[in-house]
């Protein structure tokens, strides 16, 4: 009996929801305002910027004339007689014997085939621990901005962070 009541209530709600008088063809309002359409007026020009509402001032030339925009500016050529120009200077290229070769990179040196190896006796080296360093001996440690003492000459382990990226 309860099962039959539940089906009856759900079916009546379904028919009420389907028969509501909402118009399915209504479109939601636009997210952005529609663009302003202005007809082109190249002959008379514009007095006001239609987007900002600011007044458009004309461009005045040095001669005091107003520059007319949107109209092609005529360009006239001038013919120059080649005899009125100076003749170009001609230089003779030097021969290969006269050329001086200079290396572009002066700090490049060839590594010799036989490298000098200097043996180091590790037994004669003195090992200094951080606890043994006096406060006045700053050759073996540095003090950072937090006041922490950091050993020099000792590699500091650093962990990197791998972040996946995509091509833009």
Image: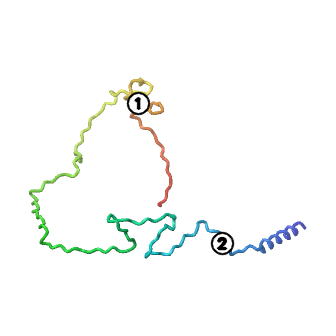
Q: Horizontal and vertical percent for residue 30? A: 61, 68
- Read off the residue under disc 1: 141
Residue located beneath label 2 in the image: 27
Sequence-wise first label, 2 or 1: 2
Q: Is residue 130 left or right of residue 5?
A: left
Mark 2 neighbour density, 10 Å: few (under 14) some (14–19) many (20 or more):
few
Residue 17 numbered mark, or none: none
**x then y, percent, for residue 43:** 43, 76
Residue 29 rendering spot, x and y as whole percentages = 64, 68
User: How many discs mark residues in the rendered view?
Assistant: 2
**SS state under label 2:** loop
Q: Quadrant of residue 152?
A: top left
Instruction: Mark 1: give few (<14), some (14-19) or many (20+) Cα within 10 Å.
Output: some
Q: Viewed as shown, does residue 144 lie left or right of 2?
A: left
* Residue at position x 50%, y 48% in the image: 161
Q: Residue at x 80, y 73 (%)?
A: 15
Find numbered disc 1 in the image and state the secondary structure of the residue it sits on.
strand
x%, y% of residue 93?
A: 11, 62
**Of labels 2 and 1, the one closer to you:** 2
Mark-to-mark CA distance, 2 and 1 = 72 Å
Name the residue: 46% across, 70% down: 46
Q: Quadrant of residue 83?
A: bottom left
């Amino acid at each position: 009996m309860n099962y039959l009541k539940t089906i009856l209530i759900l079916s009546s709600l379904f028919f009420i929801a389907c028969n509501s008088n909402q118009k399915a063809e209504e479109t939601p309002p636009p997210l952005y305002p529609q663009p302003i359409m202005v007809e082109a007026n190249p002959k008379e020009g514009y007095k006001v910027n239609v987007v900002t509402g600011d007044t458009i001032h004309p461009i005045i030339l040095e001669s005091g004339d107003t520059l007319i925009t949107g109209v092609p500016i005529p360009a006239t050529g001038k013919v120059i007689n080649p005899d009125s120009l100076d003749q170009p200077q001609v230089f003779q290229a030097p021969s290969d014997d006269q050329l001086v070769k200079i290396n572009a990179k002066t700090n490049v040196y060839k590594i010799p085939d036989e490298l000098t190896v200097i043996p180091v006796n590790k037994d004669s080296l003195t090992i200094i621990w951080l606890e043994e360093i006096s406060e006045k001996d700053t050759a073996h440690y540095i003090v950072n901005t937090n006041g922490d003492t950091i050993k020099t000459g000792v590699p500091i382990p650093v962990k990197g962070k791998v972040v996946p990226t995509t091509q833009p």
